[in-house]
Amino acid sequence: IFNSLMSRSSQGNNTALTEAGIILLPQSRHLPAITLTNQDGQPVLINELKDKWSLLFFGYTYCPDICPTTLSQLRQIKSELPKAVQDKLQVVL
């Protein structure tokens, strides 16, 4: 589902997206001027998320079981996408 969504401009089958846990907004939304913190304690400005699909995964500072597994799955999904699509996608924990 995700590959077809990223490869085409159509929004695909909304039921299939919902069943996969994907929430696709029909249009872009204005984001507030917030600052996130990266793994090195450095600020990440919201503007750094512009112009790419961003998969946001909210984890914990200590998450030895679920977080590495989920990030591994996201890396696998990204690696299976065509190169042109990979360049449009970033995964953020």
Image: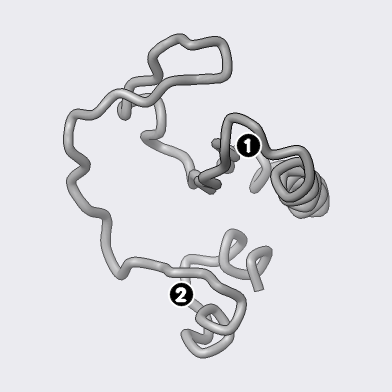
Q: How far apart are marks 1 and 2 (CA)?
A: 19 Å
Q: Residue drawn 43% across and 21% down?
A: 37
Q: Look at mark 1 in the image and give the residue it sits on.
A: 87
Give whichever of 16, 92 is nearer the camera.
92
Name the kind of residue labelled 2 in the image: Gln
Colour theme: one colour
The answer to whether residue 10 of the structure is visible from this angle is yes
Query: Splitting the image into 4 quarters, where does residue 88 fall?
Result: top right
Name the kind of residue labelled 1 in the image: Asp
Give whichever of 40, 65 is nearer the camera.
65
Query: Splitting the image into 4 quarters, where does residue 68 fall?
Result: top right
Q: What element carries label 1?
A: loop
> Where 87 sits versus 12, above or below?
above
Quadrant location of the N terminus? Answer: bottom right
Quadrant location of the C terminus? Answer: top right
**In screen coordinates, is 39 left or right of 42?**
right
Query: Splitting the image into 4 quarters, where does residue 23 fall?
Result: bottom left
- Can you give x and y, in whole percent of width and height, for residue 49 in the image? 40, 33
> Where 28 sits versus 63, above or below?
below
Q: Look at mark 2 in the image and give the residue it sits on.
A: 11
Say whether disc 1 or disc 2 marks the residue closer to the N-terminus. 2
Q: Residue drawn 32% across and 29% down?
A: 46
How many residues crowd mark 2 within 10 Å: few (<14), some (14–19), many (20+)?
few
**In screen coordinates, is 45 left or right of 80?**
left
**In screen coordinates, is 15 left or right of 69?**
left
Give whichever of 16, 65 is nearer the camera.
65
Q: Residue drawn 76% across and 38% down?
A: 64
